[in-house]
Image: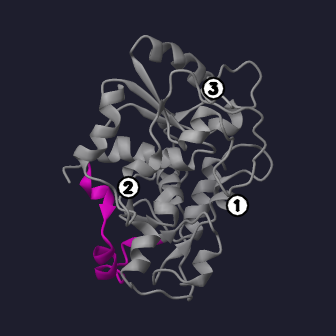
């Protein structure tokens, strides 16, 4: 596939061959948090992306100390290789990958194809929850270079205009145009305005994967980004609705294509579309 960092992906067969490997920890992260209970890969533990990653009161992530406690509860050490997978072609597994990297745990991989490919291939499933020995995980340093905040995004618009930066909107075309403010069949999450951030390119996340949920080849991925000016020499910011889909595209750009300067705007459209004074573009014209 000629990926920049092919080691960040493992196949379903590799996982089967390593189910008894004490140096890895398999973790399932799904949008549908009940899927784990229905059946999961043997030895896999569960992360609830909302309850485990988000502060219960503020619109903010848990702090580094709490992240260390979470990994300790999961039996992870700094030397543990964390193998992530989930539903929706690894949306939330990629979100967890980004969050682990943000909090300093770099030894993380995705199962290529995620839960979809695992089940389609008839790989083993269990409802047993493994027992783990808790660890004392050290509090790490956050990598703020891979997270974008609202005011950074606003300043970035000028870099886009100057040809020094790029913005990637990974939502559906109808969300990008402003026709809708949320994905089909999904609940409205309180966004008041539709549209996109000025200067953003519409490159939906789903165009980066094959029908079986695996990632497309490096050449196919480059063909999505480079012709519209999203190139590795620029600073790139990706966003979506609440950063789950943009984490997937962040993974593609940084890990598979090797772009050196990509950040994920976790506030995304639920923040930008409601923020006072933030500029938007809207291309949808109702008939």
Q: State the residue position of label 1.
A: 51
Which of the two labelled residues, at mark 1 and mark 2, occupies the earlier sequence position?
1
- Residue in front for this viewpoint, 173 or 258: 173
Which label belongs to residue 183? none
* Quadrant in which residue 270 is drawn: top right
Q: CA distance from mark 3 to mark 2?
A: 27 Å
Say what secondary structure mark 3 lies in. Answer: loop
Does residue 46 appear in this view? yes
Task: Find numbered disc 1 in the image and state the secondary structure of the residue it sits on.
Answer: helix
The first of marks 3 and 2 along the sequence is: 2
Q: Position of residue 111 (x, y in %)?
A: 38, 66
Q: Which mark is residue 209?
A: 2
Q: Residue at x 44, y 43 (%)?
A: 250
Position of the N terminus, as image quadrant, is: bottom left
Q: Is residue 90 above or below residue 207?
A: below
The answer to which of 30 and 142 lies nearer the viewer is 30
* Residue under label 3: 282
Cβ atoms under marks 3 and 1 closer than 8 Å: no
Q: Which of pointers 3 and 1 lies earlier in the amino acid sequence?
A: 1
Give x and y (percent) for residue 21: 34, 79
Nearer mark to the viewer, of 3 and 2: 3
Q: Is residue 140 visible?
A: no
Are the residues tagged 3 and 2 within 8 Å (C-beta)? no
Image vertical order of residue 32 relative to residue 270, above or below = below
Q: Position of residue 155 (x, y in %)?
A: 56, 16
- Relative placement, left or right, of 209 versus 170 is left
Which region of the structure is painted magenta? 4-26
């Amino acid at each position: 596939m000629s990926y920049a960092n092919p080691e960040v992906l493992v196949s379903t067969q590799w996982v089967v061959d390593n189910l008894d490997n004490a140096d890895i920890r398999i973790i399932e992260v799904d949008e549908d948090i009940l899927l784990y209970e229905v059946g999961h890969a043997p030895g896999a533990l569960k992360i609830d992306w909302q309850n485990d990653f988000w502060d219960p009161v503020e619109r903010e992530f848990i702090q580094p100390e709490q992240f260390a406690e979470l990994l300790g509860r999961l039996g992870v050490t700094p030397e543990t290789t964390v193998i992530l997978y989930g539903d929706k072609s690894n949306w939330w597994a990629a979100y967890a990958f980004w969050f682990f990297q943000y909090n300093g745990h770099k030894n993380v991989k995705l199962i290529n194809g995620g839960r979809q490919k695992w089940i389609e291939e008839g790989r083993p499933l269990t409802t047993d929850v493994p027992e783990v020995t808790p660890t004392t995980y050290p509090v790490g340093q956050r990598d703020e270079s891979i997270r974008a905040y609202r005011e950074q995004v606003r300043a970035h618009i000028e870099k886009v205009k100057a040809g020094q930066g790029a913005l990637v909107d990974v939502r559906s075309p109808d969300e990008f145009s402003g026709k809708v403010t949320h994905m089909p069949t999904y609940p409205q999450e309180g966004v008041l305005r539709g549209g996109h951030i000025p200067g953003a390119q519409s490159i939906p996340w789903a165009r980066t994967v094959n029908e079986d949920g695996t990632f497309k080849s490096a050449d196919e991925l480059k063909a999505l980004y480079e012709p519209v000016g999203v190139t590795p020499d620029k600073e790139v910011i990706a966003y979506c609705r609440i950063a789950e889909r943009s984490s997937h595209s962040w993974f593609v750009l940084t890990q598979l294509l090797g772009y050196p300067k990509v950040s994920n705007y976790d506030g995304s459209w639920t923040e930008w579309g409601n923020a006072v004074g933030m500029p938007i573009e809207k291309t949808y014209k109702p008939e």
